[in-house]
Image (cartoon, rainbow, N blue to C red):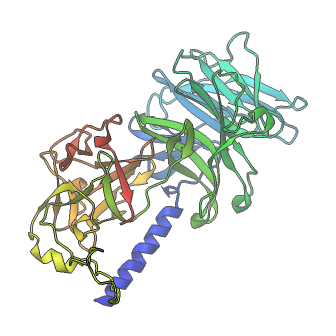
């Protein structure tokens, strides 16, 4: 029995390390990916050299995306009922002569009868002498006025901003480029709370595990700049606050793309120059976007482990609704002799308290965290190949048992004695823009509603509509 327990711990640790290292699964091999776009229930991204990746769920990726024109570093955005695809036609020639083109398609699905790209339109060029290289486009619709903006450029000189016509996809008449940054590439724009954010890639690329790519940001109240970082250095002076850098075996993140799923749930698509766990290939990565003090930063893909699941509502912990097990009393520190040897008070063990629990289903509640066995949860990647944008579904069980957190047909949460792998026992865990987490079942029995784990009171966990404005919908994971 002891040997099996050790084997289990080692296996779980190995799985955790691999999961943390891998960006996405399947065959997510791509360089300079466009912002991930959703089309008819699937996810798409395009890369340098043409083609791209497709995913049915946002976690497992495979080839099959179609983008004509070759070249480098495309981007894509949905405008109305059409998709605008932008790419650098030359792919960064040694003499820095470049051209950026745009084209439309009604769908990104190459198997659709409506799949047909329009003739490309040139929107920017570089002649090889000016201090700019017309590649690496990034596109944004300004949510305040509907205007369409494009940034482009590499380390050779300036990153530039131009305005496009959102109807034709061509250069807006009379528009002239504006210099907004220098010594960076793969730029794009994000608007939030009255600020325009310019995200760009610093460092060296295209050298595999030796690449030093990283994503930085500056911001401005005007879309034309100047873009300043958190210490007041302008991006025209080489400034930029760090957003995403190398993590463990994932080397050289670059080519930021912004994805807003709903209020409070945002993701970034990037590529890593090298994923050491996947042969050092360049791979697609998807991370949460967290906003801290008005600045975006790369969040964390959830890591497996053992946790206290803490409600943000009041700081209470998710626990089994069982009788509270008392620990042995120790001297309280007054009116006690202090001459005797100090002995540790042993922690309560699962086997000491579980014998008093019901053998069948057990309800849940929320209570003061006291480091008791009925308050500790082990979360691992579920033995299931499906996922969601940026992550797998997770299995949540009471630590040391197979008792699984489960959604019910009454939109409640309970624990069942065994994990079966059914959809109501698979959980999505998204880091939110404020750094807390949302926990959602893959499915609620007999329901098509999208529900999340919420605290409906100081002591009652249940399922309900996610509301980012309410602490009832938010959770933290603490090391027990």
Q: Can residue 66 be seen in this view?
A: no
Is residue 377 placed above or below 457 in the rendered structure? below
Residue 364 located left or right of residue 40: left
- Residue at the image position 66 percent from the left and 42 percent from the top: 241
Residue 478 located left or right of residue 120: left
The number of callouts visible is 0
Based on the displayed image, in which of its 4 quarters is residue 331 positioned?
Answer: bottom left
Residue 15 located left or right of residue 363: right
Q: Measured from the top left, where is residue 340 in percent x and y? A: 32, 89
Based on the displayed image, in which of its 4 quarters is residue 350 positioned?
Answer: bottom left
Q: Measured from the top left, where is residue 116 in percent x and y? A: 53, 28
Q: Measured from the top left, where is residue 352 in percent x and y? A: 18, 80
- Image quarter (top left, top right, bottom left or bottom right) of the C terminus: bottom left
Q: Can residue 84 be seen in this view?
A: yes
Is residue 17 placed above or below 182 in the rendered structure? below
Is residue 419 placed above or below 98 in the rendered structure? below
Q: Measured from the top left, where is residue 286 in percent x and y? A: 51, 48
- Image quarter (top left, top right, bottom left or bottom right) of the N terminus: bottom left
Residue at the top extreme? 174
Residue at the right extreme? 129
Q: Give whichever of 74, 64 is nearer the camera.
A: 74
- Residue at the image position 59 percent from the left and 37 percent from the top: 67
- Residue at the image position 64 percent from the left and 63 percent from the top: 280
Based on the displayed image, in which of its 4 quarters is residue 363 positioned?
Answer: bottom left
Q: Give whichever of 101, 109 is nearer the camera.
A: 101
Q: Give whichever of 48, 289 is nearer the camera.
A: 289
């Amino acid at each position: 029995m002891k040997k099996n327990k050790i084997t289990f711990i080692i296996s779980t640790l190995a799985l955790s390390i691999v999961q943390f290292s891998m960006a996405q699964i399947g065959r997510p091999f791509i360089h300079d990916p466009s912002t991930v776009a959703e089309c008819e229930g699937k996810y798409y991204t395009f890369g340098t050299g043409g083609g791209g990746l497709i995913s049915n769920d946002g976690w497992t990726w495979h080839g099959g995306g179609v983008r004509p024109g070759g070249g480098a570093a495309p981007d894509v955005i949905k405008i109305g009922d059409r998709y605008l695809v932008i790419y650098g036609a030359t792919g960064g020639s040694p003499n820095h002569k470049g051209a950026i083109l745009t084209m439309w398609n009604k769908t990104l699905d190459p198997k659709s009868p409506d799949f047909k790209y329009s003739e490309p339109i040139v929107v920017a060029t570089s002649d090889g002498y000016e201090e700019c290289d017309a590649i690496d486009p990034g596109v944004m619709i300004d949510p305040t006025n509907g205007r369409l903006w494009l940034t482009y450029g590499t380390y050779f000189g300036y990153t530039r901003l131009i305005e496009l016509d959102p109807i034709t996809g061509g250069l807006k008449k009379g528009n002239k480029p504006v210099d907004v940054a220098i010594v960076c590439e793969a730029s794009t724009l994000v608007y939030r709370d009255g600020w325009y954010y310019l995200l760009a890639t610093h460092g060296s690329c295209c050298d595999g595990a030796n690449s030093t790519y990283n994503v930085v940001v500056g911001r401005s109240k005007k879309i034309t700049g100047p873009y300043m970082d958190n210490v007041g250095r302008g991006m025209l002076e080489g400034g930029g606050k760090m957003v995403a850098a190398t993590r463990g075996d994932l080397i050289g993140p670059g080519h930021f793309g912004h994805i807003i799923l709903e209020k409070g749930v945002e993701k970034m698509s990037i590529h890593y120059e090298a994923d050491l766990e996947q042969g050092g290939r360049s791979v697609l990565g998807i991370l949460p976007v967290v906003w801290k003090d008005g600045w975006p930063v790369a969040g964390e893909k959830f890591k497996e482990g053992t946790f206290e699941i803490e409600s943000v509502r009041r700081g209470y912990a998710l626990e089994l609704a069982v009788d509270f097990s008392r620990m042995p009393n120790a001297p309280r520190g007054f009116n006690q002799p202090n001459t005797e040897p100090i002995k540790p008070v042993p922690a309560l063990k699962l086997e000491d308290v579980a014998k008093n629990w019901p053998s069948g289903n057990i309800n849940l509640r929320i209570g003061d965290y006291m480091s008791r066995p009925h308050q500790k949860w082990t979360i691992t990647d579920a033995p299931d190949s499906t996922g969601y944008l940026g992550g797998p579904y997770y299995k949540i069980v009471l630590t040391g048992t197979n008792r699984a957190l489960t959604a019910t047909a009454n939109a409640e949460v309970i624990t069942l004695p065994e994990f079966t792998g059914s959809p109501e026992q698979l959980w999505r865990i998204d880091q939110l823009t404020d750094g807390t987490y949302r926990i959602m079942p893959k499915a609620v029995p007999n329901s098509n509603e999208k529900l999340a784990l919420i605290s409906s009171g100081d002591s009652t966990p249940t399922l309900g509509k996610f509301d980012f404005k309410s602490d009832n919908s938010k959770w933290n994971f603490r090391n027990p």
